[in-house]
Every structure is written in structure tokens, then in C-alpha cells.
Amino acid sequence: MSAIFLNKESLPRIASIFMAWTSTYSSPLTYGQAAHLLRRASFGPTPEQLKAFSGKSASDVLTVLMKATPAEHPTDQAGKTFHDLSFGAPETEAVKQNTLDEQRAVLVKQWWLGLMLDPARGFFEKLSLFWQNHFVIATTDVNDVRYVYTYLTTIRQNALGSFRNFVVEVTKDPAMLRYLNGNENLVGRPNENYARELMELFALGRDNYTENDIKEAARALTGWQVLNYRSTRTAEIGSQFNLQRHDKEGKIFSDNFQKFEIKGRDNGTAGDDELQELVDMLLRHPESARFIVRKFYRWYFTAEISEEVEKNFIEPMAIEFRKTFEIAPLLKKMLTSDHFFDPAIQAAQIRSPLDFVMGTLLLVGNEVPNATSDRRIYDLLTNTIFRRARVLEMDVLDQPTVFGWRPYYDAGYYKIWINGTTLGLRGEFAEQAVKGANAQGLRPDVVRLVNTLSVPGDALELVKGLWALLMAVPPSQEQLDNVIDEVLLEGIPRYEWTEIWNTYRANQNDNTAINNVRFRVESVLAYLMRMAEYQIG
């Protein structure tokens, strides 16, 4: 920060602004700032996390959040992992094979959604969701759940590593080869589908290449094939390079890439060598690093990127990213920056369906049951999450187009998560999540939630505490009064809440005392979660 004190004549004013935007936020996090970080970097806070992280530095919190142990493999109801399954086994009839594969696809989605609801995994799973929405495939188009699971493994193994290696690995991934027709790309009949999306959606963004560049990239990518697609013979799947299908001539690119030439090859490593050269060429383009930083910005910060943001934040972050293309240090720098904690960034997003659903369940303490010992409730809960996200227009692993979910690629439409239908459905889900629904695996513990608050026996402090947990914006006095008098107490004097609470505290095994607290808190939570303020974060 020493540059701030240099003479203005020796350093343009913009340099000090530059540093202020990208410098690490050094003050201890307030309760609200810790909540902001958890809402954006994961799917939302738990009361326990907020207590643990308030007063800590942003860097220390990110260090904790970024640690995630390897996840257990998903299993079917018989306990078999997806590594042990061949397509459609043990069925032989095509209709039954397809039905079984569709059922297993739902199980994989449920498995991933269950991981998202683990507070210790929130950061990693939200980042994995980002990458799945960047390198999009659709389960229904791939049509072999083993490929989908292998693709998720590719995403998860590379999520915090080298973006350069990530692009290479996802290009060869069998699900991606199927989804964007890379397996149909062969010498003499190049398929340009993947090459186009590689440039436009995965590495550069629009207007940074020519049509001929796409043709040449497609030629460099010829020869890759998938293994054992929809095969009932073996569980082994993957991809392989077939030299006989590869275009062995040189590929010359436009001035966008300084007329770079990928030399033609006629050997067994031609596929890997030309792919690596192609990716290296794309990442040398100055727009590549900016493109990825902008996508992170829209995911974690806000959809709108002004010229000021572009100059003072996107560009310096891209300069750093371009040096190594390592993902973890870029994300940590972005999410611990002064700019991330700017009040203008807080409450500047519409909560996505998954942020809404997961965040609600995390707040009310609805933990994920054990997938082995409590399989029935596990299936009920994860299927509820899956169906709710889908009806709210966020079908996991089945985006409507290769562009992903529209609010993240079309900045002018970031508000479309909310409409007359989805707003009502959000309120309906919130009420069920708060009050519980055994048939949906919803088992909240709102009394435990209240016990995490500082002064739960005071009506004003109770509502203020719940508001701070749920909302990214402060309440007005009128809002507080309305929630206390009309929702919590339904017209009775405020001192009676203290009596209700003290009666419960003195009789914690008495169902009447417990329910008197629970019913009133449920009403407050359901009311708050229907408010406009709860839809933003």
C-alpha cells in the first residue's frame, strides 16, 4: 500500500485506486462480512460458521473454506459405485437399459447435491458448479451416466489447479467428446462444433478469432474417440487417440494468434502434442485471462461489469492470472480483495435457485443423512433438492444450451431467476424447509437455530438476529416492528416472548414448551424467506 503515499506527480492517481481495489482486505471480518463471503464463496452460511469466522481475516477464512477432503464415490441403492457399473447392467433389453441409466443419472445428480449441502464442502462444490456451467455438458445428450460421472471427476480434479491443464483434460473427456461431437471429428470431414465452443465459450470469448481459426483448430483436434459408449460388456470407459483419423498436415492461424502454425504430426503422440500447442496458443491471447476473470466476477461478485471495474479490477487480476494460469491463487486474491468487500458488491446478486435452496437448508440445520445407514431419508432429501432446483430453472447437469444458465453469460438477464412463478415456488419451498416435511426428507431444527443467537429471549434481539442470519441488507425499524408484533407475537405484548422463551429454557423436555417456541420461530422464518430481501445475497 506504500504507493498511496507517493507524490501525485510521480504516480497517476489511478495507480492508488488500482491497489485499493486489488489489495487484500486486512480488517477482521464483521458478522455481516463473514456472511457475505459465505453466501458468495459457498452456498450460504450456517450459524456455527458465522460465529467461527467473525473477527477472522478474509485470508484465514478462505484458507479454511478452500480445504475439502476427497468425496466418496456415489453408489446405487445396492451399494455399487459407478466405477463398477457397465451400461444398463444387468438389463439386456434396450428400453430397460435406458430406464436404468436414467435412474442412475438422477442418483449422480443427487450425490452431487448432497455434497453441496455439506458446509465444509460448500466452497469446493460451488466452484465445481461454476466449472460445470463453464465447460457445459448435458446428461440427457451424453446419454451414458458413466461418462457423466467421469466428466464430473475431471471437473473436480482440476477445479483448483492449472487452467491450462484443465482445458486439455476436458477436451479429451469422453462426455465432452460426445456432447460437442469431438468423437466425430476426423481427417477430411472435420467437425467444428467443439473447436468453436472452445474458442467462444471456454477460452477466449467472442470476436477474438476468425472462422478459419475454428476450421484449423478442428483439424488439430481430429482423431479423438470415446471408449465403450453405452457398452454392456465392460465398465472401462474413457477416450483414445486414433492416428488414422487425424489430419497430419500443418494448421496455420490468423493474425489473432500471430499466424501461429501447429506443425502436422504423424506419430502416436500427435493428438496430445497438437492439443497442447493449440491450448497454449489460445491462452497466449491477451483476452483469454480477462475472459476467465470476468466469468469468475459474474459468478462471485455481480453480473454488471463497468469500465471502472474492467480497468481497476479485471485487468490487474488478469495480468496476475496470465503468469501461471493457476486457479487457486487467482480465486483467493479475488475473494479476499478490498473490492470484494466493497458495500456496493454486497447484496448485488439475485440468489440462484441452488443458492436459495441450499442456503435455506443450511440455515435451518437440515443436515444430509448418511447415504449408507440412512439411505431412505438421504434419497428423499437429495431428490427434493434436485426437483426443487429443476422447477426453479436450474437443472443440475442439464443446462438448456452449451452457453450454460443464462444469468451467467447474458449480463442483461441476470434477474431472470425471479419471476411470478419462481417467486411463489421459492416461498412454498421455504415454508416446507422451515416447518419440515418427512415425505421430502426435510428435517429442520429451528429451535437449535434460535439457541445459536446471542439474546434469543428478547423479541427485538431475536428478530434482529434472525434477520442478520438471513439477509444481506439491514432492516428498517418498521420492518422489525412488523415482524415482531404481527408475525412472532401476533398482537400479544413483547414481554410475553421472554416468558415463552424462559418457560422453554426451564422445561426443555416439555413438548408444549418446545412447540410454543418452534411454531412462532417457524412463522418468522417462513415470513422472512418470502421477502424480496431474502432473494438477494
Image: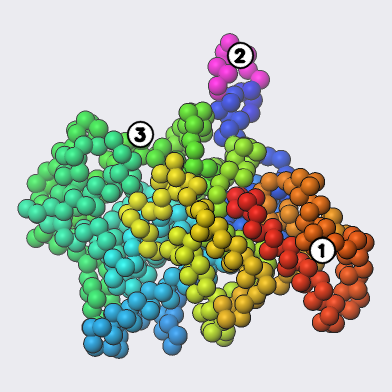
Q: Is residue 124 left or right of residue 511?
A: left
Which circle marks residue 258 in the picture?
none
Q: How are the colours assigned in the image?
A: rainbow
> What is the spatial separation of the Cα atoms under label 3 and label 1, in whole angstroms?
61 Å
Give the residue type at disc 2.
Lys
- SS class, disc 2: loop
Tell me the quarter of the picture where residue 69 sits.
Answer: bottom right
Q: Which residues are magenta?
A: 5-15
Q: Nearer the viewer, residue 40 or 63?
A: 40
Residue to which mark 3 is pinned:
286
Answer whether residue 216 is magenta in the image.
Answer: no
- Quarter holding the N terminus is top right
**Can you see residue 499?**
yes
Give the residue type at disc 3.
Pro
Residue for point 26% across, 83% down: 95
- Label 3 or label 1, whichever lies nearer to me, is 1
Which circle marks residue 8 in the picture?
2
Q: Is residue 193 above or below residue 204?
A: below
Magenta stretch: dominant SS?
loop
Residue 228 % position (x, y):
22, 74
Labels in figure, total: 3
Give the residue type at disc 1.
Glu
Residue to which mark 1 is pinned:
490
